[in-house]
Amino acid sequence: MKITGARQDRFLSQPPQGLIGALLFGPDRGLVKARSAALIQTLAPDVDPAFGATVLTSDDLVTDPARLMDEMSAMSLLGGTRLVRLRLDHERSGAAIAKIIKQIDAEPMRVEAKLVIEAGDLSTRSAIRKAAEAAKHIGALGCYPLGIRDRRQQIKDTLGDLGIGVSNDALDLWVPLLEGDHALAKGEVEKMALYKGYGAEEGATVTPDDVRAVAAGAQGSAIDPIIQDALSGRLDSLDSRFRRAVEAKTSPIGIHFALQRHILRLCEASARMDRGDSAVSATRSLRPPIFRMQEDAFVATLNRWNGRALRSALSQCQTVERQLKSTGAPAEALTERLLFGLAKFAARRHAA
């Protein structure tokens, strides 16, 4: 069944009786992931989505597409609802998956699990999309970027819930930097809330100066070289650039979140390389795309850092993020230690 517009929110919060699952697709993968998580909470609330679900990928079904039906019909050994999550990066088994969706929809009594399919942008010619949209027991939700008006309201509502206001001038500067990526927008609003103390100060309001100090893209010309120095192992250059940025009142929290977001994108590209893509192809497949002026540096970093090292770097960023959220945390010292730790690691790899 095709679910569009305002019906999507109701579908996610109150799935119809007899629903087996849903296909969530679209160019905004962050929004796909967020809506998938929301649906799982209502469709299979007793299942831990991280550890209690069976996760399949499109590669798993290339040689054995029948595995999807096997997982959907397998009974739970512990009782309760089972959850199958299918993550699609390609449609090489599209016809076989579409056939299974039709079979599931026609014989719901054979199904013992709930199904959530997450995909990128699917054309109207996609066999999988057609099958889900035509089904009676499976929903199909297109996940497209919010418009400017909706994004403005989302920012106001999220910050307002924390007791933080935001001026119209700040929104005019900020919203264009957040277009097209739900995950980016969510992370940026969270970063701004942290910068403003989560509303601890009465009457706190985000101003254009706050956006220039914190928001990704508003100060990228100063932050991007710092990140490249850290991940390339250029210690001397990193030291001078970081000092200049701090003296120019660039937010250490902004630097940290920009670094974490950059490493997340490297992890995504590295995963594509593990599936056989070249570094250049993996880089050019990212959405939103890497700016062409930064592409060579991004590819060089990919070739310097393997997937395991990137995951370790991301874990370090997440540890620092938790520390930054503690009251009175020394943001400058924590960010500096993280940057130089990564730079020293990169320098050792380059020398090896």
Image (cartoon, rainbow, N blue to C red):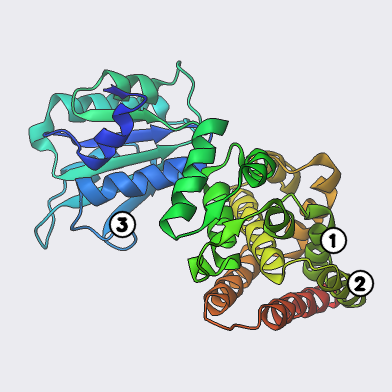
| Above or below, 276 relative to 99 | below
* Residue position for label 1: 225
Instruction: Decide if residue 39 is on the left or right side of residue 324.
Output: left
Mark positioned earlier in the residue sequence (3 or 2)? 3
Position in image of residue 9 (x %, y %): 31, 36
Near mark 3 (Cα within 10 A), the count class, few <14, some 14-19 or many ≥20, is some
Residue at 34% across, 36% down: 65
Report if residue 147 is visible in the image. no
Cα–Cα gap, marks 2 and 1? 9 Å
Residue beneath the point at 53% across and 70% down: 201
In the picture shown, does residue 293 fall above or below 265? above
Q: Position of residue 347 (x, y in %)?
A: 83, 76
User: Mark 1: which secondary structure?
Assistant: helix
Say which quadrant the N terminus sits in: top left
Real-space Cα separation, disc 3 to disc 2, in angstroms: 43 Å
Q: Is residue 341 left or right of residue 130?
A: right
Amino acid type, residue under disc 2 in the picture: Ser
Residue where numbered disc 2 is placed:
237
| Mark nearer the N terminus (2 vs 1) | 1
Distance of label 3 from label 1 (alpha carbons): 37 Å
Determine whether label 2 and label 1 are within 8 Å by CB: yes
The answer to whether mark 3 and mark 2 are in CB contact below 8 A is no
Mark 3 or mark 1, earlier in chain: 3
Neighbourhood count class around disc 2 (C-alpha, 10 Å): few under 14, some 14–19, many 20 upward: some
Q: Name the kind of residue labelled 1 in the image.
A: Pro
- In the depicted structure, whether residue 187 falls above or below residue 352: above
**Closer-to-camera residue (285/227):** 227
Report the residue marked by disc 3. Answer: 49
50 or 161, nearer to the observer: 161
The image position of residue 306, as x and y in percent, is: 67, 64
